[in-house]
Image (cartoon, coloured by chain):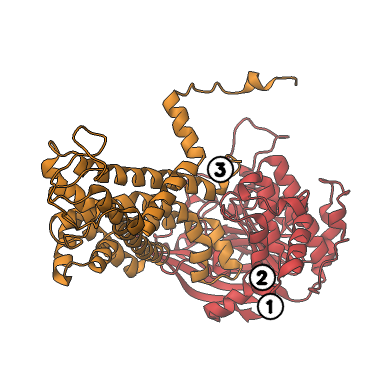
Chain colours: A red, B orange
Amino acid sequence: MRGKQSSSNPICDGHRDEFGVGYAMQGIGYAMGPGPVLKVEDLRVSFSTRRGVGMAVNGVSFEVKKGETLGLVGESGCGKSTVALSIMKLLPRPPAKFEGGRVLFEGEDLMAMDEEEVRSYRGRHIGMIFQDPMSSLNPVYNINFQVAEPLRIHQGLRGSALVDQVVTLLRRMRIPAPENRARDYPHQFSGGMRQRVVGSIALSCEPELIIADEPTTALDATIQAQYLNLLRELQEDTGVAILLITHDFSVVAKMCHRVAVMYAGTIVETAEVETIFNNPAHPYTQALMAAVPDIAAWKGHLSPIDGSPPSIYETHRGCPFAPRCAVVQDRCREEAPPETQRAKEHGVRCWLHV
Amino acid sequence: MAVSEGAIGLPRPQASRAQKALAFLRRAPHLPLLILVVYALVAVFGPWLASYDPTDIGDMNRHAPPMFVAGGSSAHVLGTDHLGRDVFSRLVYGARISLIIGVTATTMGAFLGTTLGLIAGYFGGWVGNLIMRVVDAMLAFPVLLLALVLAVTIGPSFATVILVLGILSWSGYARLVRGQVLTLRNKEFVLLAQIAGCSPWRIIVQHILPNVVSSIIVLATLQIPGVILAEASLSFLGAGIPPPNPSWGSMIAQGRTYVTTAWWTTLFPGVAIAGLVLSLNLLGDWLRDLWDPRIQGAHR
């Protein structure tokens, strides 16, 4: 599956409609894939700081299948990015500490590996795209050097084969005149173009999984749409699995097949994207959906969720969402709810559904 | 949109003649480079240029004025000092000593400080804390006193001066580099380099170091004159270059007493140091601009 990309793939031809690729078109491919590319089981990560020990990720489980995009959504500070960096084992330790769980990449537990072994997975099998295209590229090196680096290290490419591969990658991310632009420095690119370069780096070794941590948050709306379309086309083309971290439901609607909703370090609901939008089960997901402004049914005010998420340094009994929940029961404050399967591909952690 | 460039261009501030001259100097490193080449040539070929032995007191013709001053003669172009030694010859021989000390000690300090700063900034932890506490102690302690103690303990010699000044000038680099590394290591390109499979040392040397080199060079060009002056102070206190040997610093130190009557014994070494300092600073500015890709093109 991981053969060389031919330069005549449809992405390069570039006459496809920029905005019109239907979500349904890719729905079939991913469901037929084999086992999950990435399976996270009961991941727990803590941070030791002066304020004490905080559980940033408290028993997170999910899986991403081949050709699928899983959206990991939640508000700021709920642990989304910590999950992403834990998968890559890139959290600075200390202060971070891995407390338990498994991260299975194609059946291999990354958490049990030493640094050397993990390094052979990063970049080669898992690519990553960060939020800020301004600081994702090293200002002192040209684009060619930076896109070539993983190819040099992981695939041992040298000389003209390396240059050709860099140009091919830049072309796949639709960077105009890649032969010339490869010699330019990051400051000579716009934000959107830089993020495409970062995409080229993530794709360079044809990984099975790309972790995209809010890849479009720093881009403006039209560039955002272009970038997401590009990612989706690449996914159709290569079958790469994407773990998309975001707090933007328009991005979720455009990109994701399934969604995991995260709150205070735990996943409260996992479901297919239609279910999350049309039939959310967890009160937190319902409140989030109510908070998304709807221009067609504009009520003249926004509907926020009252209160604020708990600090990771507080220990709490029961459901972490209980203090803000509209339908809270006594039991919620005493005991954390277990995960229940409401339907295939629809899990929820709430006493209402037990 | 037919808007002429003048209409939308920002008004340029009127530069004075001095500012224009300075801007020219900054743009073209030719003059500082030329001056530095002359210094280097003088240092290398000193023995052929000097007409006297720098330690030769001759016929004890004390404080003979330079040739272009009333009473001066062409025998001593820049006059003689309080022992009758030829100022020009001492200046020429001193160039070698001062330049070697300045460059070697600064390089040593920069290398040491940068290495420790990179380690403290990137790895942090107790090692980083230890390094920074030592830096704090070094900055709080009068360096000259420490240098004096060290130099006297080891015994004054050429090598001692270089070693002592080199070892004592690292703290500034360590602090500068650590500060920059602390911000750089949180940039996402460091994470991407880790993802690309780079080892910590490769990240430090290949991804972080090039981002701080320009600051190190600027600091180093500012430190060289400091080191030369520190050597002068050591010489003045008798712990520097052993006496009859000339260095610019010791020439100024010795001539200080007679500055009102025999100004040439301090002025010429002073001018020599000033020329070196200015040239190095201009060169440093230019190198910094040259190596910063963000402002590339401004010089082309």
Quadrant in the rendering for residue B109 = bottom left
Residue type for callout 1: Glu
Question: Can residue A344 be seen in the rendering of this structure?
Answer: no
Residue at the spot of label 2: A152
Question: Any mark on residue A106, and which?
Answer: 1
Residue drawn at 56 percent across, 58 percent down: B189
Q: CA distance from mark 1 to mark 2?
A: 24 Å
Residue drawn at 80 percent across, 65 percent down: A238
Disc 2: CA contacts within 10 A as few (<14), some (14-19) or many (>=20): some
- Residue placed most toward the observer, A16 or A98: A16
Disc 1: CA contacts within 10 A as few (<14), some (14-19) or many (>=20): some
B58 with respect to B46 (left or right): left
Under circle 2, the secondary element is helix
Q: Chain of mark 3?
A: B
Q: CA distance from mark 3 to mark 1?
A: 46 Å
Quadrant in the rendering for residue B149 = bottom left
Residue drawn at 55 percent across, 81 percent down: A113
A339 with respect to B34 (left or right): right
Q: Which quarter shows the N terminus of chain B?
A: top right
Q: CA distance from mark 3 to mark 2?
A: 29 Å
Q: Position of residue B123 (x, y in %)?
A: 41, 67
- Residue placed most toward the observer, A73 or A334: A73
Q: Position of residue A31 (x, y in %)?
A: 80, 68
Residue drawn at 47 percent across, 37 percent down: B25
Under circle 1, the secondary element is loop
Residue at the spot of label 3: B295
| Circles 1 and 2 on the same subunit | yes
Q: Which quarter shows the C terminus of chain B?
A: top right
Q: Position of residue A5 (x, y in %)?
A: 82, 67
Q: Nearer the viewer, mark 3 or mark 1?
A: 3
Residue type for callout 3: Ile
